[in-house]
């Protein structure tokens, strides 16, 4: 695969359990296989090679296809359930270099010979990217606080967050060959930091990257990035060696389909309803290419075919979803020429399909734009919509759409609030809750939508309100930036939660946001929820129960649910609560609650702490990588990039 393709081509990964327990150690010349398997033994100079990958790849199917397994203690492997085709097989593993590719077909026994790496440098080329990125140094504690070029408001924790688990590895991998070296196409530079200044200005996200590194972080990261790649260029290698897969890590089969294009990335995919995982069994997978394209990839895993659905918008005059407020991290034109695409504009879209979810009927609901930025009249001040009366909204950057795979009918639900990650509840109305909703909690009553087809009737929203007076009900509240007032609650500003998750049994709705400005709300965190159908108010309290409120929230000036976070105000902020449970650090990648986007119940915090409610809280995997950060050169939060969510977990575990 070319470097260009390796950077941009997206694959879907699905992991399934495979091997049974190994037989007692004995000479093994054959393994049990079926007619659609390939199996054998991998040996090296010292005998059987345990914990190495065997890869089978073919281009004879409608799309490029591969399966990957891991050898057991005796070097045995079985690649199961292969479609009929000719395959190229080879061995890859830590301490090795790729073995020569051998042709094989399903039903064939094939013993393979591993090739030991001739030196440490050759072996390191197969290390996970994070081991290379862990070589990058970070400023010492004494450099923070305003005494150096690092801006005074940048703490070491914020630096770790920006460089470790939000910006630099939040959108893409860092440490693979293409990022630990400087592409020759960018030119020649006197210093490494000059090279990085030019590099991050490339492409349609160049403006955002430059603003973050040169603006918010004072340009200091360029020095550290440059030092990192300079040391790599001089031959420095990672200090730690990754262990080969052990135990249950060997019980995984990774199936890969190449289902994107070289100019498209797939931000997410969906295959079933998480509440009813038999929905869409063996059916197509639907991708979300976000701001790279309106062509949604659809993969049929049975036929190995890929089709594309052009996602329309309701308003044909709607602008592309680039820049604020739609997606502030990308713009319509490259800031500077890309090393791979030059000045070509490779991303173009209006739907901005971020994330999809199946419902129990087999339809796919997307967080996707359906129009431009301005909200319809029913969202705004003067409307008789119950939620608009309580809290009018003028603008939103992304709404909701629905695709029925049976008919391929595509429907628009014009929401007044923004959307990011949808999650279905367990209630009789099959409520769809959304994150990224700005200063409000937002939801869609899908039962009402199915009965009426009326987007206004089906949706509701209400502002986030902190019960600062502690009386257990929603009262008059102060606006963000105003001093706290006795007897009044406090409205919370911000971009809304990053994620929401309905509880399967108790009816609570858990929400989480990531921010460096954190505070704990303890048992008094709540949100005011206005019913879209009846106009009655409700609240979610620390018990997680949705209850009628005794008073409705007061009306508020028209507000925008822009895609960019609002900084809010520190004025009148509650002090950090002592109630156990709230997470106030992202050190191990768990949910972090911002005081400007409070969770709706304490349930969220307690689960985050145990790792039961955080999508990427695979502590076992982080623990196995922790050695790479024990020298203090960088933050353990970087290990979070080694663990994926959902269908991506399988590939991430294999390094």
Image (cartoon, rainbow, N blue to C red):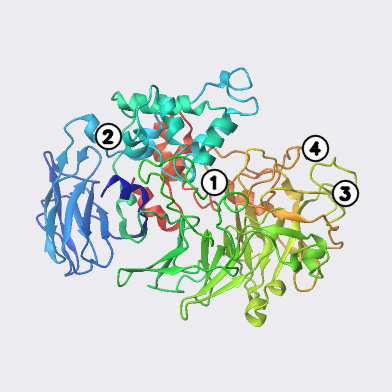
In primary-sequence order, the first of circles 1 and 3 is: 1
- Measure how far apart labels 1 and 4 are at the Cα level: 29 Å
Q: Position of residue 455 (x, y in %)?
A: 67, 73
Q: Secondary structure at mark 1?
A: loop
Q: Which residue is mark 2?
A: 124
Which mark lies nearer to you, 1 or 3?
1
Q: Residue at coordinates 23% horizontally, 66% vertically from top-left?
A: 82
Label drawn at residue 571: 4
Name the residue beneath numbered marker 1: 329
**CA–CA distance between discs 2 and 4?**
51 Å
User: Which of 235 and 4 lies nearest the eye of the viewer?
Assistant: 4
Q: Position of residue 597 (x, y in %)?
A: 69, 48
Q: How many marks?
A: 4
Q: Residues within 10 Å of mark 4 (few under 14, many from 20)?
A: few
Mark closer to the chain start, 2 or 3:
2
Give the residue furthest to the right.
Answer: 486
**Snapshot quadrant of residue 241:** top left
Q: Give the CA separation, mark 1 to mark 3.
A: 37 Å
Q: Earlier in the sequence, mark 1 or mark 4?
A: 1
| Percent coordinates x, y for residue 437 in the rendering | 66, 57
Q: Are marks 3 and 4 in contact (CB under 8 Å)?
A: no
The quadrant the C terminus occupies is: top left
Image point (13%, 47%), residue name: 100
Q: Are marks 1 and 3 in contact (CB under 8 Å)?
A: no
């Amino acid at each position: 695969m070319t470097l260009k393709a390796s950077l941009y081509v997206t694959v879907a990964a699905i992991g399934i359990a495979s091997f049974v327990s190994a037989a007692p150690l004995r000479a093994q010349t054959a393994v049990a296989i079926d007619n659609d398997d390939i199996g054998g033994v991998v040996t090296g100079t010292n005998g059987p090679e345990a914990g190495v990958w065997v890869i089978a790849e073919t281009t004879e199917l409608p799309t490029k296809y591969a399966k990957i397994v891991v050898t057991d203690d005796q070097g045995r492997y079985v690649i199961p359930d292969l479609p009929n085709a000719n395959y190229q097989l080879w061995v890859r593993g830590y301490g090795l270099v790729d073995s020569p590719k051998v042709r094989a077909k399903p039903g064939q026994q094939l013993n393979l010979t591993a090739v030991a790496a001739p030196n440490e440098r050759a072996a390191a080329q197969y290390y996970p990217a994070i081991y290379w990125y862990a070589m990058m140094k970070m400023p010492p504690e004494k450099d923070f606080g305003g005494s150096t070029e690092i801006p005074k408001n940048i703490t070491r924790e914020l630096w770790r967050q920006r460089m470790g688990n939000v910006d630099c590895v939040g959108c893409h991998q860092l440490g693979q060959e293409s990022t630990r070296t400087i592409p020759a196409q960018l030119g020649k530079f006197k210093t490494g930091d000059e090279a990085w200044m030019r590099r991050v200005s490339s492409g349609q996200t160049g403006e955002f990257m430059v603003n973050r590194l040169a603006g918010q972080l004072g340009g200091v990261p360029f020095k550290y990035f440059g030092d990192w790649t300079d040391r790599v260029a001089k031959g420095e290698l990672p200090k730690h060696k990754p262990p080969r897969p052990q135990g249950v890590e060997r019980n995984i089969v990774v199936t890969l389909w190449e289902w994107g294009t070289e100019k498209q990335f797939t931000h997410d995919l969906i295959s079933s309803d998480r509440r009813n995982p038999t929905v869409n069994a063996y059916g197509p997978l639907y991708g979300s290419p976000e701001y790279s394209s309106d062509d949604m990839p659809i993969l049929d895993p049975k036929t190995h075919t890929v089709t594309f659905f052009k996602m329309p918008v309701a308003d044909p005059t709607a602008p592309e979803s680039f820049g604020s407020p739609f997606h502030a991290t990308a713009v319509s034109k490259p800031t500077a020429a890309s090393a791979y695409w030059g000045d070509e504009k490779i991303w173009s879209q209006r739907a901005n399909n971020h994330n999809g979810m199946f419902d129990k009927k087999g339809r796919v609901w997307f967080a996707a734009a359906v129009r431009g930025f301005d909200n319809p009249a029913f969202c705004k001040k003067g409307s008789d919509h119950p939620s608009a009366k309580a809290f009018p909204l003028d603008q939103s950057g992304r709404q909701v759409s629905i695709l029925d795979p049976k008919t391929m009918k595509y429907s628009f639900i014009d929401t007044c609030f923004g959307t990011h990650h949808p999650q279905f509840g367990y209630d009789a109305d099959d409520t769809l809750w959304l994150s990224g909703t700005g200063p409000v909690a937002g939801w869609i009553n899908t039962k009402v939508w199915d009965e009426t087809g009326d987007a206004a009737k089906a949706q509701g929203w209400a502002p986030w309100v902190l019960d600062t007076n502690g009386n257990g009900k929603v009262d008059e509240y102060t606006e963000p930036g105003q001093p706290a007032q006795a007897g009044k609650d406090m409205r919370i500003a911000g971009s809304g939660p990053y994620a929401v998750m309905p509880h399967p049994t108790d009816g609570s709705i858990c929400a989480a946001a990531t921010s460096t400005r954190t505070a704990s709300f303890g048992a008094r965190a709540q949100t005011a929820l206005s019913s879209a159908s009846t106009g009655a108010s409700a609240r979610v309290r620390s018990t997680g129960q949705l209850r009628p409120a005794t008073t409705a929230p007061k009306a508020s000036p028209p507000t925008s649910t822009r895609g960019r976070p609002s900084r809010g105000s520190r004025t009148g902020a509650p002090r950090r609560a002592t109630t156990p449970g709230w997470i106030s650090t992202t050190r191990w990648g768990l949910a972090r609650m911002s005081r400007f986007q409070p969770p709706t119940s304490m349930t969220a915090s307690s689960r985050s702490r145990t790792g039961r409610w955080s999508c990427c809280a695979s502590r076992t995997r982080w623990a196995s990588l922790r050695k790479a950060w024990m020298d203090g050169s960088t933050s353990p939060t970087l290990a979070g990039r080694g663990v994926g969510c959902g269908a991506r977990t399988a590939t991430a575990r294999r390094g």
